[in-house]
Image (cartoon, rainbow, N blue to C red):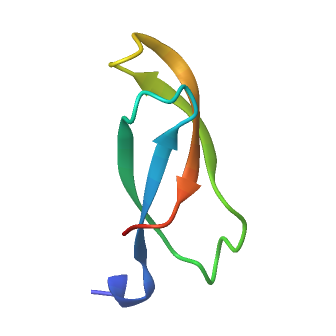
Amino acid sequence: MGDKKKNFIKLVSAAGTGYFYLQRKNPARIPTKLEFRKYDPWGNHHVLFTEAKMK
């Protein structure tokens, strides 16, 4: 019910494979850009995923 302020963000692979994850983020609680080390199935290894704007 309180999800009105959360926005979807796109986490894009730094490996350049084009793979991405979608995640929800509350910009009021987390003002900085997110970075995660996650699995990239197209590159077949863990890489850094950084926040990018949704188009």
Residue 22 rendering spot, x and y as whole percentages: 35, 53
Residue 24 rendering spot, x and y as whole percentages: 41, 65
Q: Which quarter of the figure is the C terminus placed in?
A: bottom left
Choose top left, top right, bottom left or bottom right for residue 5: bottom left
Residue 14 drawn above or below residue 27: above
Residue sticking out furthest to the left: 1
Residue 14 drawn above or below residue 46: below
**Of residues 37 and 16, the one drawn nearer to the viewer in this rendering:** 16
Choose top left, top right, bottom left or bottom right for residue 14: top right
Residue 45 rendering spot, x and y as whole percentages: 47, 11
**Of residues 9 and 52, the one drawn nearer to the viewer in this rendering:** 52
Residue 42 drawn above or below residue 31: above
Q: How many marks?
A: 0
Q: Residue at x 43, y 79 (%)?
A: 6
11 sits to left or right of 4: right
Q: Residue at x 36, y 35 (%)?
A: 19
18 sits to left or right of 47: left
Q: Residue at x 41, y 23 (%)?
A: 40
